Amino acid sequence: MVGVLIAAVVGILLASWLGITWGLLLGLLGCLLLLVPIYKQGGVVFGVTVVAFSLLQLCCGSDAPARKLALWFDAHPREFSVEGVVDGAPKVSSTGTMGTATFPIRVEKIADQDASEPQSLLPAGLLVTQVHWPVVQDFPAPVYGDRVSFQAVPERPSWPRNPGSFDYRQWLERHGIYTQFSIDPAEPGKILSSGHGNPLMAWALIARHRMETILSTDLEGAPRESSAIKGITLGMTENAPDGFTDDFRFTGTMHLFAVSGLHVGMLAVMIWFVLVAARLPRPWSVAIIIPMLFFYVAVTGLKSGSIRSATMVSLLLCGSVLYRRAPLYNTLAAAAIFQLAWDPNALFSAGWQFSYSVVFAILAITPSLERRLVAFHSADAFIPPKLLTRRERVEFSGWKYLMGLLSVSTAAWIGSLLPTIAYFHLISFSAIGANLLAVPLAFLVLALGALSLLAGTCSLWVAGAFNNANWLIAKILLLVVQSSALIPGGHWFVGPLSKPYPVITLFDLGGGFCAVVQSGREFALVNAGRKRDAERDILPFLESRGANSIQNLLVTKDDAVHLGGVPEIADELKVKHLIFFSEDSRSPVAKAVLNAFANSRTTLSAGITRPLLGNVTMESIALPGEEVGVRLCCGKIRVLFLPRLTPEISQQLLSKTPDGLLDAEVLVMPLGGSELLSAQAVIHKVSPKYLVSSVNQFSRVGVPSSEWEYLLAQRKIVYLRQDKTGAVMIDADPKQMIVEPYVPQTDHVEADRSGAR
């Protein structure tokens, strides 16, 4: 089965990367099937597997009906009437008095208002889309299995606009979703009827909600401990407090929230002992355990790790009934093949890769490593066990148990190393030690959670008693993880090789402003954006580049738009120095930041020049009011940052600022709301080759006039408007400066963004 798995992976990759056509694959499949009766083993069988999984990937990928219809929608942007069945549990997010429920639907009808045949738009095959449903008091959100109808304009999820940000569009496409429908609250959708989903899945969702209620009983005042209990027992972290999973990610213990072999194996053992105590025959016991395992997998969200472990346990149980040994490598490969046959796109998911790489490493490394470690402190092989004292037996048994845990933890760390670097850009050196304590504690949390669920079916009072006991174990677990995360050097972010010259990344934050300056392995920040900007864009980018500290964080204006993300960045990365231009601030956010950096901040007056990084210097420019201009000098390459040009600022720059101080190859300045004549005069004085302008679509003065494209083209200035280009990256190469917009590395690039590049 291992060879067949390798062939299946090769087939999926060929179809994804090379764009193989149906005709070629069907021709190859026909030739190989003719050879199978003659050559029943070896290359022919593997060749059939490669072609078969390539065909499966084509069905789920480039030739999927949902993708073809999405391309048709792109060319025909208008409103459609849609009817379908909710195909998943809605996720509700609320903002004030209004919320939004997001869920997939299995489309049954798509009607074009202008078409004579309403059914003509529905392609042959399964079509799943995503719906954003407004939730208000009179229009509640639908539930799984409801048939709904609505009118909306289809849209494609947007690509990430900043490097390092989560690619939500690609994630949806890997799950077969290419189109989103956002319903206008003025024309809400209708729930036509209920009960059209899979009965087993509906029952699983009801059970999941009931289990969540039981596990939360009497823990209303302990959100972190409650989240840990629900995460370990059910794999639920959706409603956890902000930053809850960070310490688990840094210490390599995030797998505790992934329902996998530990959870499924424990459940199987518990059910097995109950059925054995009831004297049920082995075949009947296996026939009961396997459906219950997959029902638990459905309750916990059909995660890759839980599907893998349930499949492996099922194969092992079937082998025990048939009195056939099930080799673990063979069983692992068989589980992977079943999963890929059901969904070839699972190969590209982080959960699938983590799950199988970790289990493979445990199977391959643990036995030999455990033997070597146990040999350091074990009884002499020539001494009969009966001659050992009780203390010696306890010592040797305890050492063997401890080395077994250490071996599994080390093997799991090795197996997760490459996926962790690829997805989290992180190496956690504290993971081995943290898992030695965290895994046994998580086992206790899981056991008490199972007891709470069993007791909760009869009495919530008894369930609350178990939950309070579980609170103590979860509290200890959180302390262990938090202490491990505080170990100096316990985790280290890694990134690609740095370039021999400075690189500046200008983020597109929808009107906010932030620039990351990298020189070698050192980093500096010009502003930190808003809080959500730091969490969503800035921190992921810094992690992906291997930033473990910020040498200097320069704040040009003391408001939430420019420094709201400082606390989030400082919590995760060490900020060595904070540079301000104003000591007195009325902003509560600024006051909190100033107090937090009382011993590591510098307040500068405008007109000061100082080093920012090793070969990057900063020059500040005095402006009216609280505004400050900044110029970064990277050798001969200069980047000038200016705020929005009011008449007072323009006059100051034109009449009172020395000419040489404004010279720059790149000018970063919002053009929205700037007066044309005075702004043109400033631009003429700067004489840039490139002009980068941020855009705020929600501000009255945040969108630049369309005249700027013509005016800047006349001056032969490259105009980079960030609502079209996304982030802008500047390579300050002394031989040839490179300024280019960010374009995600994907197979499909939007026409307007590729045109902008």
Image (spheres, rainbow, N blue to C red):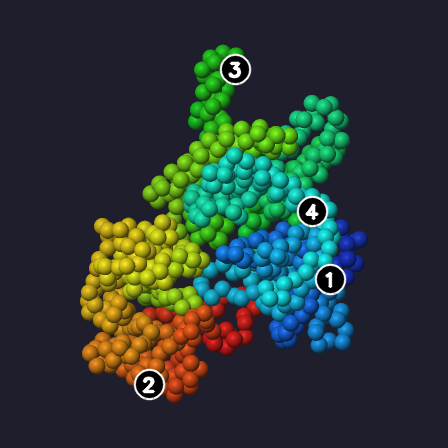
Residue picked out by circle 4: 202
**Label 4's element?**
helix
Circle number at residue 501: none
Residue picked out by circle 1: 108
Label 2 or label 4, whichever comes before in sequence order:
4
Where is residue 328 drawn, in percent x and y? 63, 38
Label 3 or label 1, whichever comes before in sequence order:
1
Nearer the camera: disc 3 or disc 2 = 2
Circle number at residue 677: 2
How many numbered tags mark residues here?
4
| Disc 2 packing (10 Å; few <14; some 14–19; many ≥20) | few
Tag 2 and tag 4, C-beta contact below 8 Å:
no
**Label 1's element?**
strand
Give the vertical position of 557 relative to 200 (above or below). below
The amino acid pointed to by label 2 is Leu
Q: CA distance from mark 2 to mark 4?
A: 64 Å
Regarding residue 487, the answer to whether it shows in the image is yes
| Disc 3 packing (10 Å; few <14; some 14–19; many ≥20) | few
Q: CA distance from mark 1 to mark 4?
A: 19 Å
Locate residue 716 relative to residue 648 in the image: left or right.
right
Locate residue 733 relative to residue 52 in the image: left or right.
left
Circle number at residue 385: 3
